[in-house]
Amino acid sequence: MIRFFFRALSFLALLLAVVTAAMDSIQSVSSSEVILTPFGSAWQDLDAQSLDRAQEILDRHVDQAYVLAAVDWTLRQPTFSVFLALSLIFWMIGYRRPPPSRFAA
């Protein structure tokens, strides 16, 4: 059950990565230059209040500078790459090993 949940999350993240990559490629073709939407900008456009709440929670509960630097670095990355990384992580968590064959040692 848990593996299915993580595989479904992986599929959803992969779907979002493809959609955001398609949107970036359409914008890039229409403007004749490469346009990559940062994850923080996409999150801000989608729901500004949730981004502010997440930053407040991190500021209140996390004191390590390297964690805040990692979050800031993630928010500056292209949206499709963040969703691709999340998809890979969720797929790895939900991965099911194939059963051993009868010739396995």
Image: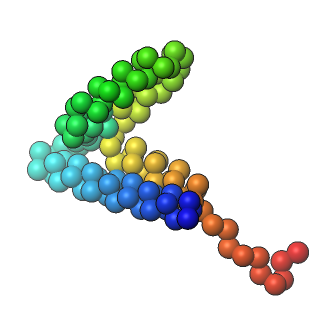
Residue 7 in percent (x, y) is at 49, 62
From the viewer's perspective, is 33 left or right of 90? Answer: left
Q: In which quarter of the image is the C terminus?
A: bottom right
From the viewer's perspective, is 37 left or right of 98? Answer: left
Residue at (36, 21) in percent of width and height: 56
Residue 96 in percent (x, y) is at 63, 66
Work out whether residue 99 or residue 39 is closer to the camera in this orientation and state it: 99
Position of residue 99 relative to residue 36, above or below, is below
Where is residue 55, by image quadrant? top left
Q: Can residue 41 be seen in this view?
A: no
Residue at (27, 56) in percent of width and height: 19
Residue 64 in percent (x, y) is at 54, 17
Where is residue 8, by image quadrant? bottom left
Residue at (29, 52) in percent of width and height: 21
Q: Quadrant of the N terminus?
A: bottom right
Residue 18 in percent (x, y) is at 32, 58
From the viewer's perspective, is 41 left or right of 1? Answer: left
Position of residue 74 relative to residue 5, above or below, is above
Work out whether residue 62 or residue 42 is closer to the camera in this orientation and state it: 62
Work out whether residue 91 or residue 57 is closer to the camera in this orientation and state it: 57
Position of residue 26 relative to residue 38, above or below, is below
Q: Farthest left residue?
A: 30
